[in-house]
Image (tube, rainbow, N blue to C red):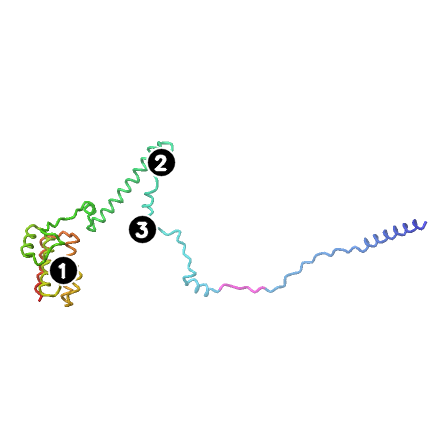
Amino acid sequence: MLRLLCTIIFVLFAYTSNGAALAVKPVKQPLVLKPDTTKVSVRRFDNAVITAHSKQPEFQYKDDTDTTPSWWDRFWHWFWNLFKPLKLSKHTMSPFLRILLYFLQYLFLAAGLAAVVFLVLKLMGIDMLGVFRRKSMSANLPFTESLENIHDINFDDEIERAVSQHNYRLAVRMLYLKSLKQLSDAHLIKWQIDKTNSAYIDELTNAHQRQLFSSLTLQFEYVWYGEFVIDGQTFKNINTVFQDFNKGIV
């Protein structure tokens, strides 16, 4: 009996609590839009500042997309296009003929470049053909260079003989050896068969004489060791310089 009474009291209490909760449910209030009362400060661009900045190089942006290429750029564009393969149809030509045309294209280009290089070298006075087929010029010495003794040579006869044979290189060599003999006879140098030309120059104590002989030595080495071909008029000019130097040897 007591249990039944407790159950009835519990059910009545739960029903009463649920009803009370439903009775106090809050009512939704309508939304109210509040106006924005913030004050806005309008800022404007300063034209003077814009003008000042536009005159500075850092703010000058140039569009180079529409600029016309120079003739130098056009030339290189044309030049490199020459090396592009020919645009040939794949359906109208056999592979062998296509390869043959490619080969002829690059062959003509190589021949053209070679012709331009040859023309430039020709204008510069360089004979490329002569460089490859050039042979050592024989001096026709009546004695070997390593064993010659300047005190045993009749220089006037040897120079005259070389000039009569148009062997001007040998004649210049005789002029140089004759100057060495005169310097040795004047005790300005000590001649030895194994000495170098620079050693003789260093032995000269007179600065002016040493400078002149150094210039003569340079001319002689260009003609003799450089195998420069000279004509009769050039030899006359060289002979005059040697004669003037020999007259000053005391």
- Could you tell me how far apart the alpha carbons at marks 3 and 2 are, in whole angstroms? 29 Å
Q: Earlier in the sequence, mark 1 or mark 3?
A: 3
Tell me what residue is drawn at x 58 percent, y 64 percent.
40
Q: Would you say 139 lies left or right of 117 here? A: left
Q: Would you say 244 lies left or right of 66 here? A: left
Report which residue position mark 3 lands on.
72
- Could you tell me how far apart the alpha carbons at marks 1 and 2 are, in whole angstroms? 76 Å
Q: Would you say 105 lies left or right of 221 here? A: right
Residue 239, percent from left and from top: 9, 58
- Could you tell me how far apart the alpha carbons at marks 1 and 3 are, in whole angstroms? 62 Å
Q: Compared with residue 43, is residue 71 higher up or lower down, i.e. above or below?
A: above
Tell me what residue is drawn at x 11 percent, y 58 percent.
177
Q: Is residue 80 visible?
A: yes
Report which residue position mark 2 lands on.
88
Report which residue position mark 1 lands on.
192
Q: Secondary structure at mark 3?
A: helix
Q: Amino acid at mark 1?
A: Gln
Q: Earlier in the sequence, mark 1 or mark 2?
A: 2
Q: Amino acid at mark 3?
A: Trp
Magenta extent: 40-45
Q: Secondary structure at mark 1?
A: loop
Foreground residue, 211 or 40?
211
